[in-house]
Amino acid sequence: MTDDHLYQRIRQAVLTPGQRVIADYILRHQNRIGCMTCLGLAQEIGVSDASVIRFARAIGYQGFSDLKTDLHRRRSQDMLETQVGEYAINERLNIQTERYADLDLSKELPKLLLSNVERSIVQNPYQAYSKTIDALHNGQRVVVLGLRGGKGPAIYFGRMLQFLMDEVQVITEATEGEASLLQGLRKTDTVIAISYARYYKCDKILADLIQQRGAILCTLADSTRSPFAKIANTVLLVETKHMGFHNSAVGTVSVLEYLATMLCWRYPQTYQARLAERAELQNSFYFWDET
């Protein structure tokens, strides 16, 4: 990641409160900005077009047109990054070592990983988080599905939810046995699916099964091209860029931790009581009188 990216410019700029509103909108709706005029964007945000131009200049662009050009370039790069995930793992490593050959890995990789965390959280609208939080709270049963690169985050999130709820299942393999767990889904259940490229035939099969059962599906995906994202009730996009052969999971884990924390803050009485019971159980295992 280079320092002239839009996100880094906004992060480093000294902005007025009004300009922060514009920045927040643009960060959350980057896919739309490229086809909007300065006036159209201003009207949608509720500011003047002059304010949009001043914002663009405040973060180092010559004007709104220059900002749009940079956005288009970055979105093209994002598409290329997503395509890397569709290669076999040995091919990915070859592509990445060639792409980043001139960079100082010790400096640039930490920047990339930190950017994955920040952009993953910021790029999704609060409404999407809110709907996912309510779906987790209201689901009679929660199924966390994470295959391949999503396996680790799925296990981690499933463990967090098991502190808070009774009916939590984690599926990390696309075997017939584990997939059969989805056959019992009901409309009152919630599925959290974590999905990265490469996408496989089994992803489509499982997504179709979830849709047939009518369960609420919330997807964390690296792209809207994911079979799960295409049918999800809610999609939370996560950044998975890396310089190695694998997808980065730090953005995904950060979003999952954000969801778990917001869930407890929204429904404190429900989960405080549950955690108190869990703490009492833990104490019976870990504390004893040595006298």
Image (spheres, helix red, strand yellow):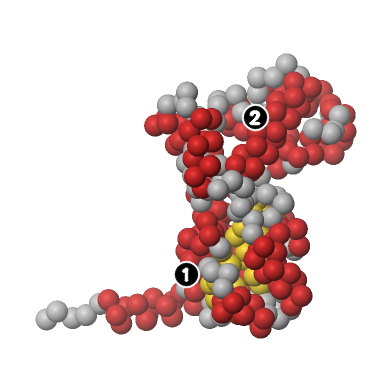
Toward the viewer: 225 or 285?
A: 225
Q: Amino acid at mark 1?
A: Arg
Q: Position of residue 242 (x, y in %)?
A: 51, 41
Q: Residue at x 71, y 59 (%)?
A: 227
Q: Amino acid at mark 2?
A: Leu
Q: Which residue is mark 1?
A: 159
Q: Position of residue 45 (x, y in %)?
A: 81, 38
Q: Which residue is mark 2?
A: 6
Which element is circle 1 on? Answer: helix
Q: Residue at x 49, y 77 (%)?
A: 274
Q: Residue at x 39, y 76 (%)?
A: 279
Q: Residue furthest top?
A: 62
Crowding around mark 1 (Cα neighbors within 10 Å: few <14, some 14 to 19, many 20+) is: some
Disc 1 to disc 2, C-alpha distance: 36 Å
Toward the viewer: 26 or 49?
A: 26
Q: Quadrant of the N terminus?
A: top right
Q: Residue at x 69, y 68 (%)?
A: 205
Picture layout, residue 32 above or below residue 176 = above
Which element is circle 2 on? Answer: helix
Crowding around mark 2 (Cα neighbors within 10 Å: few <14, some 14 to 19, many 20+) is: many
